[in-house]
Image (cartoon, helix red, strand yellow):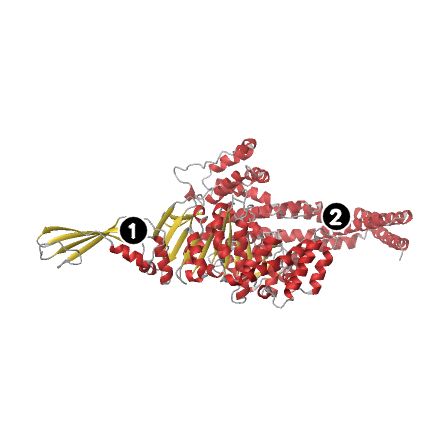
Amino acid sequence: MTWTTMALRVLQLALSLWVISLVVGVTRSTVVVAVAEVLFLASAFLLFIPSTAEWARGRLAKGRDATPTEVTHLNSAFATAMQSLGVDEAGEAPRWRVEDSGELTSRSVGVDSLHVTGYAVTLDEQHLQAVLVHEINHHSSAAYSVPEWLLRWYSAPARWLAIAAFWAAIAPFALFSTVKRVGTRVLIAVGTLTIWLPVAIYFGLGSTGFLAFVSLTVMALGVWHGRRQTLVADRATLNSGYGAELVDLLSAKVHAGQDAARAQRHWWVKLLDTAPSYASRVRALGPDLTTRPPADTQLAGFTPRKWPEWPWLLEAPEAAAALSALSHDPALADHDAVRIEIAGGNATTDVALRERFVTEIVELGAGAVVHPSGLRNLPGARVGVQDLGSRAVHFAGPIALSHEMMRTSMLVVGPPGSGKTHSVARPVVENLALSALTGSASVVVIDPKGDDFERAGWFDVTIDPLNPTHGLSLFGGTSNPDIAADRLASALIPPNMSDDKAYFADASKNALYDCLAPFRAAFDRWPTVRELLRLLRAEQQATDQVKARLKGLDGAREWRERLDSRIRQSRGGHDPAASLVERFSRLDRPALRAVLDHESPFEMNDINTPVRVRIALPEAEYPEASAIIARLVVSQFVQTASSARSNPRIFKGLVIDEAGRYVNEYVARGVQRLRSKNAGIVMLTQSLSDFPHELQNTIFGSTGCKAVFGGVDPDTAEQFSRWFGDQWEAEVTRSEGQSTGHSRSSGESRGLSQTRGSSWSSTPHSGTSTSSQRQQSQQRHVSETDSYSSNQSMSTRWVERAVMSTSDIIHLPTGSSAMFLSSADGSRIGPMTVDHRA
């Protein structure tokens, strides 16, 4: 069909509609139209019939039934939310519907169901409670449901008319702009006018115009009512005690750019939007949060917070005024104050951050410059005593581990069940996660069991092959094939390879480089797991594909030679990289490829920003592959954190559970380089024997902070005892008995004898003395005997004894550890016994 024929058909249709509209317009069918209008205006009573209402709402509502896991999460939060609303018994849990939406709250309403968005279901319980309180106040109240549905019902004709008018206008315009012939364009224009003119006459002359006017008016009222009720629900959520959580979520949406995305929509979509912008909702709640602090914060003698004098603040008087007002607010939380202070300091050299700071401190107050996650604080109860001002976690009283101490790295040893994960690792991870929210730290946690550190809201990225929501880059974000080959080889090659097999290790690294470098040059990206495996196996099709892409590129000859070298190496009598190829093939599993070939994987270079990452290892399902992934993460961290491009303003922390299986020589020696780059590693293990024998002394000596729990094996306890050192003690012996006329030592006294010892020095030794040497040292003493009478004498001698003996360490009380802390400036504390249960 030609364009001319199509245009004639359109003209014929237009003429037919013209005739019909003239007939209807002239006769005006007053009775028919009037009856239709009355029926439509009276049809609202159908909304009060449950079955009809459910059918109508089901037609408008979008979503799916919640999964069992989601139902459990929602029911738990729902029960607490109902209690916050003053309902002691939540009653029967509602039926849950989940909309596939990234919005904060749902737009749909059900009669016997409660609707939430997919984004809300992913929140931790405390923030989900705030969303549910808002939903309950918004959608379930009589002030909302009936007017909202009446407005939706009566505005439906206006919405349909607007949609029809849009397409009736845009379709002829698109057709007109496509056609090149002048005559055809004239026919299209005439046809379009003949369609629109009778429609205008029909709605102008006919009484149906009244119905359209009513529908348009009601639609405008509906938009106003929806926006107003959202703000009312926000206020009710605030009054229920969830104001801070709601502001957290709203601020997260602002920083995620959702308001900016809304502003880019078509004008009619923005005009009909029944939800106000997230920024306006934050501003509406802001005054209530700052002017009504909790009663327990209104302390006598409150001292306003003093901000540093940033030079750039002189050019931003509005921001300075907002900071001054914020400093006099007793409700200002410590985590907010620390975050704002750190951001203000960084804004001195970061212009983009400065512009953001100036804007947000005026609009959002304490909610300014929040973490990209939108969270200002970790949800739930604290597991440790945190001091964000000094960036330290307290274990018992004044005993605290700060970032300055973590820079020296830490070794924690304890048998299963001793409490090293609960008492040390989790408080440290919590401190680093909180510090990340303030912008001063990043943290990577290796979780071999998969659930030891699984806490809602603690992490931005969770890499779990059994639930591949995030990916992991095999190459750590580097663009250098040499670095990428070394990182990957360090994870694939066994950590305890002997010197006589060093040739195979070097050959494996060269094989990786010979495959990675040509592929990177040819495709300007890294290969997937299967692509790299095929190149390592020197498959002809894979190498030919890379060579074909190398044609015409600078250095193509060198890359082709490297590929040919790998082919010759693999086809020789014995491939020295065969072991590496077989180990790498263990990563060629669907679940692992979903993580390692992810479209947007986590790259280790991201630790230079305040990111929080958990690596959940499926050791039960993939034991060998899990060890490879863990070693890969550890080596990437050490190489990235110790590089010249490491961000010194961010403390970069790595926490490794079961570290003995994942630490090799490269990592053990790399620990010493981390302290100068503001980074550190916390290694947890059950025994020092878990580390390769040749690395035990290196690891023990390179970690500045140490903690050992009771119940460890004697060899581990002995090494800690030697490290803690010896001290001189004065031992006094009093004896009563028959005098023989000459002095006796304590071992020769007869009768009743009492011995008392006191320490003379507690300086730890280097830990190099052996047990036999220490026993000999204890035998060197000075004996002094004073005779008081014929039957009384006192003997004093100085003996050198261990600060904590092997037995003392093995028999430490349950829940206690012997801890030794040192700082990057050389200061030391301990050893000391710490009761973590206190």
Image coordinates for residue 124, horizontal then vertical, percent? 52, 55
Residue identifier under label 1: 727
Is 421 placed above or below 319 here?
A: below
Q: Is residue 804 left or right of residue 303?
A: left
Q: Amino acid at mark 2?
A: Phe
The quadrant in which the C terminus is found is: bottom left
Point 44% across, 55% down: residue:
698
Q: CA distance from mark 1 to mark 2?
A: 100 Å
Instruction: Judge left or right: residue 822 versus residue 643.
Output: left
Q: Position of residue 689 (x, y in %)?
A: 42, 62
Q: Residue at x 39, y 38 (%)?
A: 300
- Which one is closest to the eye, mark 1 or mark 2? 1
Label 2 crowd (10 A; few <14 / some 14-19 / many >=20): some
Q: Nearer the viewer, residue 163 or 754?
A: 754
Residue occupied by mark 2: 210
Q: Could you tell me which secondary element the residue under label 1 belongs to?
A: strand
Number of dots carrying numbers: 2
Image position, residue 511 (x, y; %): 62, 60
